[in-house]
Image (tube, grey):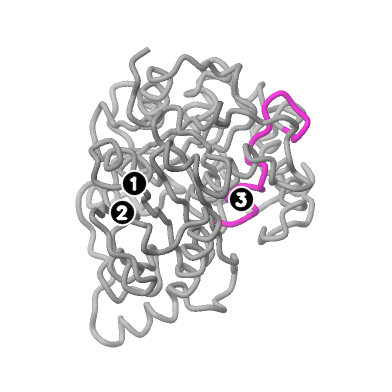
Amino acid sequence: MPLYAEKNTAISGIGQSEIFRKPQVLPFELATRACELAITDAGLRPEDIDGVAAWPSVPSGTVAGFGTAALSDIAATLGIRPNWWSGADNAAQLSPILEAVAAIAAGYATHVLCWRALGERWVPSYGSAATKAGFQLMAPSGYIEYLLPFHAPSAAIWCAIHASTHFARYGITREQMGAIPIVQRRNAALNPKAIYREPITMDDYMSARMIATPLSLLDCDVPCDGTTAVIVSRLDAARDLKQPPIVIEAVGAGARDRMDTWIARYDYPHMALHDAAAMMWSRTDLKPKDVSTAHLYDGFTSLTLAWLEALGFCGEGESGAFVEGGQRISLDGELPINTNGGQLSEGRMHGFGHLHEAVLQLRGQAGERQVKDARVSVIGNGGGSVGGAALLRRDG
């Protein structure tokens, strides 16, 4: 097995702000808090940080919306003077991590601060003001132009199309899929930051308002305000820091067929996440059986099923049977998934919440939801035309 660059890197610090369902704190302030917490967690100072990466890259002065903290604004606010910075998006929400790995491998940086900052709950107020000022918030472009005439502007519809095809082909049922949000809500009850912590039953799930068949309201993640930050460091440097380093064993990304489209792949209903999973496993000797916890994208529940299959935890079309009843994916099960409650309950931290939780599990710092002797964790982020995967492990 070649020594890929990521094996010489580690996550050395993590930080997460409060998570709000309703606008309470300016989202840029939440981003600042999370980044400060990550730096402190690692035992570093702002002047030690020599790289910054975030996705998406937003203009200076942005304080709310889909991305709330520009690279330049965080650097200026915290007193960081980076040698290197990036806002690339090739690997969905894990793009900053892959970019940091590349920068460290090239010798551009030693400690890279990465973050995902969201302030979508502020959009109605900021959006209304912008509209009144004469700004157009979104003009259709690219493949969106072809979807709008069919009344399909939403990712919920695109994912529902994939899920409907997959369910019909393999006989997967909504009752089987419902085990995921039910188990994740049970996990969220042990997470003080989670937005929704009250238990839900199968009756609750089956009676929830439909959004786009087969997806109901309880299959859709929860928009929120909040930021998660991590520091990726060169492994030898990370070993001298405050926390035990969590090694980045392998990464993956890709959209090998029909880049930037959800529906035109030759192997539809496969998505870019299948490419990312294949690349990740090609870069390690570890196997699915070695994984202690899985932190899989749940922007919509059907994407979690797709990740389970793509990562090889079950066969093609077997994800419904794999999760049925929920025991296998519970905290004490064969493969605990989304132990923080995931985006369906904690809030849509856009995959970085999964990354944060994976590090807590591997450090043994997850509190009441800690999985016994967690040694290897996998993160799968994204759906449709973008996907990123990462395998983390304890050092040594």
Q: Name the disc covering residue 198, or none.
A: none
CA gap between label 1 and label 2 equals 8 Å
In this view, the residue in front, 247 or 150, is 247
Q: Position of residue 195 (x, y in %)?
A: 66, 61
Please give the residue where the numbered disc 3 appears in the rendered image.
344
Q: Position of residue 368 (x, y in %)?
A: 79, 47
| Magenta extent | 330-348
Which element type, helix, strand or loop, lies under badge 1? loop
Label whose residue precedes the other's in the sequence (3 or 2): 2
State whether residue 109 is above or below residue 73. above
Amino acid identity at mark 3: Leu
CA gap between label 3 and label 1 equals 35 Å
Amino acid identity at mark 2: Gly
CA gap between label 3 and label 2 equals 32 Å
Q: Position of residue 318 (x, y in %)?
A: 59, 18
Which label lies toward us, 1 or 2? Answer: 1
Q: Position of residue 110 (x, y in %)?
A: 34, 46
Rendered residue at 30%/76% (across/down): 61
Q: Name the disc covering residue 110, or none.
A: 1
Rendered residue at 46%/67% (across/down): 31
* Residue 333 falls within the magenta-colored stretch: yes
Please give the residue where the numbered disc 2 appears in the rendered image.
51
